[in-house]
Structures are given as C-alpha cells and as structure tokens.
Image (spheres, coloured by chain):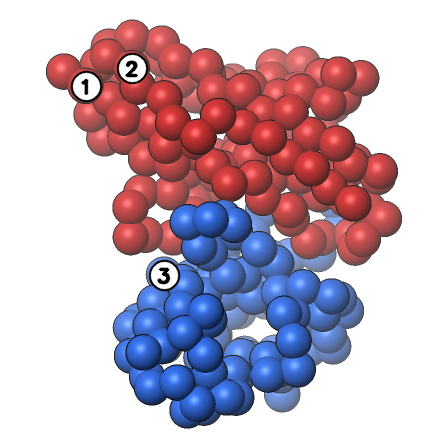
Amino acid sequence: GQNIDQPTEMTATEGAIVQINCTYQTSGFNGLFWYQQHAGEAPTFLSYNVLDGLEEKGRFSSFLSRSKGYSYLLLKELQMKDSASYLCAVRDRETGANNLFFGTGTRLTVIP
Amino acid sequence: DAGVIQSPRHEVTEMGQEVTLRCKPISGHDYLFWYRQTMMRGLELLIYFNNNVPIDDSGMPEDRFSAKMPNASFSTLKIQPSEPRDSAVYFCASSLGGGYTEAFFGQGTRLTVV
C-alpha cells in the first residue's frame, strides 16, 4: 500500500521562502509529483521527480531522496497568489503503471 | 485543446436518486482517472482506464458506484442510489501512458446529496 504524509497547514510571509515536506511509504516507488490546487479549482501539475536530487523550475524547486522516502517542495520569493494547497503524490508500479496516490495536501497561506 | 472537460460543474440531488457525472479527456490521452476529493480524505483514486478498458477499480467505494468508457473521448461515473456521504468533488483526469506522465485534471463536479 501507500502512505503519504505532509503537514496540514503552513503560513509564510510574502517574499520569503517556504519548504513543504512530504514523506511516503510505498512498495514500488515509480515517481513523485507535486500539484498546486487553488480553492475551488482543479489540481495543476508543478513538478516531477523520479531520481534523487533537486529539480528547479523558476521559483519552485522539488527535491527527492528515495532512500529516505522524502521529498520537499521549495517556493521562493513568495507571492500572494501562491496561497493554495500543495499536493504530494506518488506513483506505485505495483498497483498500476500510471495511477497516482495523493497525500491530503498542505494548505499554504501567504501573508503580507 | 480545451483540456479535460467535466459536466456538470455542480449537482445537487436528493438521496436515493441516480447521479451521472461526465468526462471528456484530452484528445490522444490513453489513460483516464476518476478521483473523489473530500476534506477528510483528500484526493482518492476511484478507478482508472487505459485505452477505454478499466484497469483498477479497487478504489470504487461500493456497488452503488460504476464507471464506463464507451470510447476514447467519453467516460461516465454513475452513483445509484446516491447517499449524503457521497457528497464530494469528483475529478476526472487524463494522461499519456508510459514513463513520465503528468495527469491533467478537469475542473471537477461538486456533488451535494441532500
């Protein structure tokens, strides 16, 4: 089975840096995704990691350590529009090649 | 492409009624997923299809739920009879198969069963 854990809520200040952690347990790890979801909207893709290390994409970066079952999403130069839920999801090859299992998400509030 | 299209956006129905949710995936995508999202349980995978064939329906809560994909451009999720605990946002997503594949989500259907 899969077990994905992330903090429920976080608050950070506009212009600052915030790190959202995700730990997972899965029997057949096959990739980790981060999605952003604004209230009342659909999740949208942010990043994908399958190998250890850091993937950088503009203000957002995602890190993966497969041996530790750990990932984080790093958001730099926070903007008010970054207030959203951030969902960590893992793909498990033992349950299917392409289905994603999501954590419950971290609700980030950016304050002025 | 207009992305994944779901209908209706909102549905309010009485307990015991049949509810049908609809989804049009992105053209060319060969995987289609149905998710349910609630505050308590987050996003849960209900069922997914590959090339119109159901691959894993282990997430379907019970026999009241059924899903079909009669062709590559259309899928339905049906709840019969509906119950108040089925109230949630139901998302459809699609992706291309193989290797690195991000899923693209529709805007969801907010279902309220009273």
Q: Chain of mark 2?
A: A
Which quadrant would the N terminus of chain B be assigned to in this image? bottom left
Q: Chain of mark 3?
A: B
* In this picture, residue B111 sits left or right of residue B18: left
Chain in red colour: A
Amino acid type, mark 3: Gln
* In this picture, residue A67 sits left or right of residue B37: right
Residue A22 coordinates in the image, percent (x, y): 58, 25
Chain in blue colour: B
Q: Is residue A26 above or below residue B26?
A: above
| Residue in the image at 65% along x and 48% along y | A100
Instruction: Please name which of the two marks, 3 or 2, marks the residue nearer to the observer.
Output: 2
Label 3 to label 2, Cα distance in Å? 27 Å
Residue receiving disc 3: B107
* In this picture, residue B30 sits left or right of residue A78: right
| Residue in the image at 29% along x and 15% along y | A12
Which quadrant would the C terminus of chain B be assigned to in this image? bottom left
| Residue in the image at 41% along x and 64% along y | B88
Given residues A89 and A1, the one toward you in this image is A1
Q: Let me know if residue B110 appears in the view.
A: yes
